Image (tube, rainbow, N blue to C red):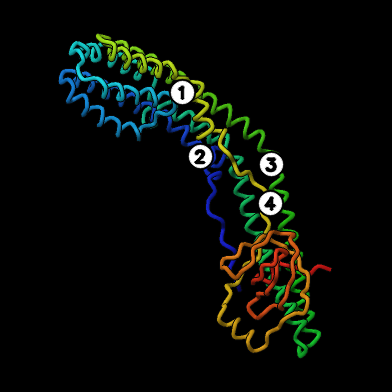
Amino acid sequence: MASLPKEPPEDAKKKSFWMPGNYSRTVTRTEQSYQACNDIVACFMERARVEKQYAQQLSQWSGKWKSIIDSRPLYGSLMKAWQCFFTSTERLSNLHSSISQSLVAEEGERVKTWQKETFPKRIFCGFRESHDNNSSFSRAQKPWSKKLLKLEKARVAYHKSCQREATTLDKEKQANENSEMSPEKKQKFTDARERTTEEKEKCREHYEKLLEDVTSYTPRYMEEMEAIFEQSQEEERKRISFLKQAFLSIHRHLDVTNNESVKAVYSELHQTLMSISDQDDAKWWKNNHGPGMPTDWPKIEEWVPPVKKLNRKKREQRRKESRPVMIGGVKVRALYDYVGEEGDELSFKAGEVFLKVEEEDDQGWCRGVLTGGKEGFYPANYVEAVE
């Protein structure tokens, strides 16, 4: 018996926020934000030390942290602003050593204090915000996930029943073509085919019923998930706003405008910092990791029969022996989409009408001619005759 068609590769939409467990990216964002604070403190404490060593070490510092921040969790305008500090540093060769003490005594302690107050921890559970978000998302998603699992089982059962029906149809066809077989035996094949057809219809009815249940529950599921997500977004907006102010304060210490070139460097940096937007960054996160992501919502997936691999050498030998050519051809209509894997195979869409010019061979393939004149092979079970 031919194997079931392979499942298509995972679509990017399967990674959508709405799919089971994918809210984890939003849950772990709290821990990533905490780590970002550690990185910011470490970054600017090191900057303070670099200030003492002037131009050479400033260049080393900039190069090191450029590579580090690429893997850090900040994003959007906030990330762009952080990167701008390094661009400015590369253009500066001589900064006052007094900046070092200001960065350590004021900004470093400020971020550390805010970080301690903003990220309260639970014993054995990590951050309280992460724990609460995970619990809320899990509760909201659990009923929908169960329904989705049942729907997937129904889909698999339906496709298997389609496969069984196709097998019994082939057997019935072979029995009817066998003139030596008794009518009683032929009737058994017909009965078997009717049973599999009835089973397939029951499976599809069950599949459609579960899909209706999932679809009707989806609005409630989306409402609950978005409410939890918006709470997380609000906390993230607060963090972005604080770090924006922290960056602006650090900028005030670093803005040593002793000459026009230095003034120009820090003027550009200030514009970048002022462009930090909690709304734009939160919107970016929503569209790339939250409810704004494209989602492949469940729908009926029609069964497509398998295609046997065409043995061209064997077919060519048979054609030389019998050459079963049909004069004028017979019109057929495609039941399914098919994309030819080889140059001598036809490609067509479901519903397309073309000519069959050779009868089906023992491999299940025919030769046909498309409307545009291209001639080639196609699987016989992908078309039906046009009456």
State yes or no: discs 4 and 2 in contact (Cβ < 8 Å): no
Q: Earlier in the sequence, mark 4 or mark 1?
A: 1
Q: Where is residue 285? Give x, y as percent.
A: 49, 30
Q: Which residue is mark 1?
A: 236
Q: Where is residue 13? Give x, y as percent.
A: 56, 44
Q: Report how far apart the C-alphas of labels 4 and 3 lie in the structure.
A: 12 Å
Q: Is the residue marked by circle 1 packed among few (<14), some (14-19), or many (20+) residues within 10 Å? A: some
As displayed, is residue 318 above or below residue 252? Answer: below
Q: Earlier in the sequence, mark 4 or mark 2?
A: 2
Q: Which residue is mark 2?
A: 22
State yes or no: discs 4 and 3 in contact (Cβ < 8 Å): no
Which mark is drawn over residue 215?
Answer: 3
Tag 2 secondary structure = loop
Q: Earlier in the sequence, mark 2 or mark 3?
A: 2
The residue under the point 17% across, 20% down is 54
Q: Is the residue marked by circle 3 packed among few (<14), some (14-19), or many (20+) residues within 10 Å? A: some
Amino acid on which disc 3 is placed: Thr
**Which mark lies nearer to you, 1 or 3?**
1
Q: Is residue 232 left or right of residue 116?
A: right
Q: Where is residue 92? Give x, y as percent.
A: 24, 19
Amino acid on which disc 2 is placed: Asn
Between 305 and 256, the one nearer to me in the picture: 256
Tag 1 secondary structure = helix
Q: Earlier in the sequence, mark 1 or mark 2?
A: 2
Q: Is residue 234 left or right of residue 37?
A: right
The residue under the point 78% across, 76% down is 328
Q: Report how far apart the C-alphas of labels 4 and 2 lie in the structure.
A: 23 Å
State yes or no: discs 4 and 1 in contact (Cβ < 8 Å): no
Q: Report how far apart the C-alphas of labels 2 and 3 lie in the structure.
A: 19 Å
Which mark is drawn over residue 300?
Answer: 4
In which image quadrant can residue 162 be found?
bottom right
